[in-house]
Amino acid sequence: MEESRIRSAGLPETPNRIERHSLHDAILTRLRDMIIEGDLAPGTRINEGQVGAFLGVSRTPLREAIKFLASEGLIELIPSRGAVVKKFTAKEVRDMIDVIRTLEQHAGRTACATASDAGIAHVRALHDQMIGCYQRGDRLAYYKLNQAIHSAIVALADNAALADVHQLLQTRLKRIRFIGHEGPQKWAGAVAEHEEMIAALEARDPDRLAAIIGEHMDQAWNRVQDGLEG
């Protein structure tokens, strides 16, 4: 009976429900980018009507995306206020950077010892793409590849628990890490640190890579701390 109705409606017999998932992913990506770039600043209440109109979507998929971003820690759902972009204190940011440093140093040491040549080559390819974005001045694309490189190095350690915690904290620091590239000097410094990280990884030098990651995280904190409160 169901198949007969599908054929009579002129629809394919195999259901195609990709569009809804694609819409959900598209809204998530746009909202994340708006938070990362500061269009939705920390502490801002998200007006569903205005944001929905801006994105050209209804409130239902928008609310689903907001709930998902709340589960990631980018948005807070506050009684009587609604959805608010998460605003981290200086201490919270420093604490998360310290943990990320430890995770990435451990992952880097493990990767130097056990990663395949193909895995390291993948990180190099991401790095080269990132440099291209830097040379073009495409800051958002650069940032996303930058974060992908950190995740890729962690993935080389082949430790699911480590990767899960790293992804959680990295997601929460998206906006903070993005502002760490503001200004030519800060951006150039971050690029130089990444160049050294890739060289140490390719040389499979665990001590050097751990030291560079540590310095990179210290500089990440130095680049953002002046803009934080508390």
Image (cartoon, rainbow, N blue to C red):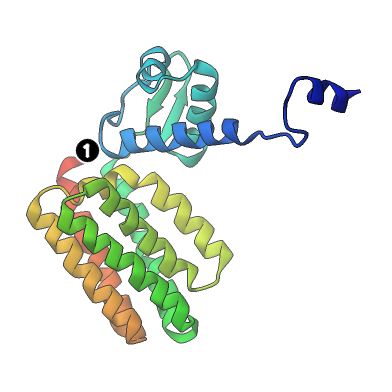
Depth check, front residue: 135 or 223: 135
Depth check, front residue: 28 or 16: 16
User: Residue at horizontal 39%, vertical 68%?
Assistant: 104
Badge 1 local density, few (<14 within 10 Å), some, or many (20+)? few
Q: Does residue 15 lie above or below 93 as drawn?
A: above
SS under mark 1: loop
Where's the C terminus, which quadrant?
top left
Q: Does residue 174 lie above or below 209 as drawn?
A: above
User: Residue at horizontal 34%, vertical 60%?
Assistant: 98
User: Residue at horizontal 17%, vertical 41%?
Assistant: 227
Residue 152 percent coordinates (x, y): 43, 66
User: Residue at horizontal 54%, vertical 72%?
Assistant: 158
Residue 218 percent coordinates (x, y): 23, 63
Depth check, front residue: 37 or 109: 37
Q: Which residue is mark 1?
A: 229
Is there any visible trace of residue 110 in the rendered image?
A: no
Depth check, front residue: 146 or 89: 146
* Callout 1 amino acid: Glu
Q: Is residue 20 left or right of residue 180?
A: right
Is there any visible trace of residue 175 in the rendered image?
A: yes
Q: Does residue 51 lie above or below 221 as drawn?
A: above
Where's the N terminus, which quadrant?
top right
Quarter of the image for residue 213 reads bottom left
Residue 55 percent coordinates (x, y): 38, 23
Q: How many marks?
A: 1
Residue at far right of view: 1
Q: Does residue 25 lie above or below 124 as drawn?
A: above
Q: Is residue 114 left or right of residue 16?
A: left
